[in-house]
Amino acid sequence: MLPQHLNQNGWDTLHISGSASIASLEQVQRLHPTPERPVVVLDVREESHAIVGGYPCTWRLGNNWANVGKSRNAVIADEQSRIAALKQQPTVEIIHRKDAKHGLENPRKVVLKKPDISSEEDLVKSTGAEYLRLMVTDHMGPRSEDVDLFVAMKRALPEHGRVHIHCGVGQGRTGIFIAMHDMLKNAHQVSFHDLIERQLAFNPGRALDFNKDVTHEGRANLRNDRLEFISLFYEYAKQNPKGAPHSWSEWLADPTTPSQQR
């Protein structure tokens, strides 16, 4: 429920939700996808991942950047290869995300014998929901090709369709794309400030917090670039309600778009 002191315009027609990683059929089934009310699960994770015995699993490197610089096809091929190899193993060891991130000597872990393993795409589609994968690098703004795919999805989505967005922990990339969804629907009637304020109330992660100091984490420039992107995307959405008439890339190529931000 959005706090009453915030701008409510268009909020009740967003038909959107967000979460951390998808881990089970039940999680998608709770969205109640039907032909009459379609659901698109928008997976905005560049890193290779799978569902293993009911656990959401990721192949990690530092900063969660195992697939940085790879093409869309290369990421998909990497993930498929890893899933196929995992299915051949008699046991699978899963290390707790936070312990792996911090390189603990004795991390929390679970060992599974011949678990069920599937890609997220296969699991989602088995429920009747639609699935779209965007290759968004953790801690960074999306590439133009992924923004174009997102806008195309929005254009094709029926008015009563629902979007469920997720990244790894349901904060950074999830928050960015929920804000983009809100902007495409409501930038014509809600100010940038009001949109950001209500997104922060909905998802208090720091991805959209313009006042949060992240210098100590060594990623201040990346965070600032992402905030510059979302500011520019608001201008795009205001000029192209619901992503029309121009795609993101077309709009960026227009000489009237502020060149210093392209």
Image: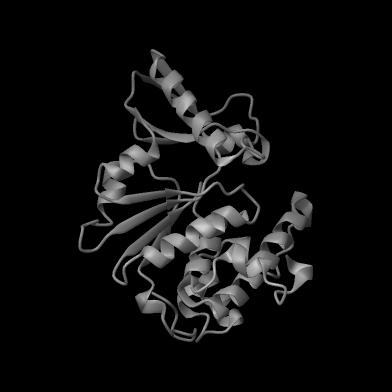
Q: Find residue 35 and report its image quarter.
A: bottom left
* In this rendering, position of residue 63 left or right of residue 81: right
Front-lying residue, 116 or 153:
153
Q: Is residue 184 above or below residue 122?
A: below
Front-lying residue, 213 or 128:
128
Q: Position of residue 70 (x, y in %)?
A: 63, 37
Q: Residue at x 58, y 65 (%)?
A: 248
* In this rendering, position of residue 22 left or right of residue 35: right
Question: Which quadrant: the N terminus?
Answer: bottom left
* In this rendering, position of residue 50 left or right of residue 146: left
Q: Position of residue 87 (x, y in %)?
A: 39, 20
Q: Position of residue 94 (x, y in %)?
A: 47, 27
Q: Residue at x 41, y 14 (%)?
A: 89
Q: Is residue 152 above or below residue 254?
A: above
Q: Residue furthest top?
A: 90
Q: Residue at x 49, y 56 (%)?
A: 149
Q: Is residue 31 above or below residue 4?
A: above
Question: Which quadrant: the C terminus?
Answer: bottom right
* In this rendering, position of residue 204 left or right of residue 70: left
Q: How many marks?
A: 0
Q: Position of residue 81 (x, y in %)?
A: 48, 24
Colouring:
one colour
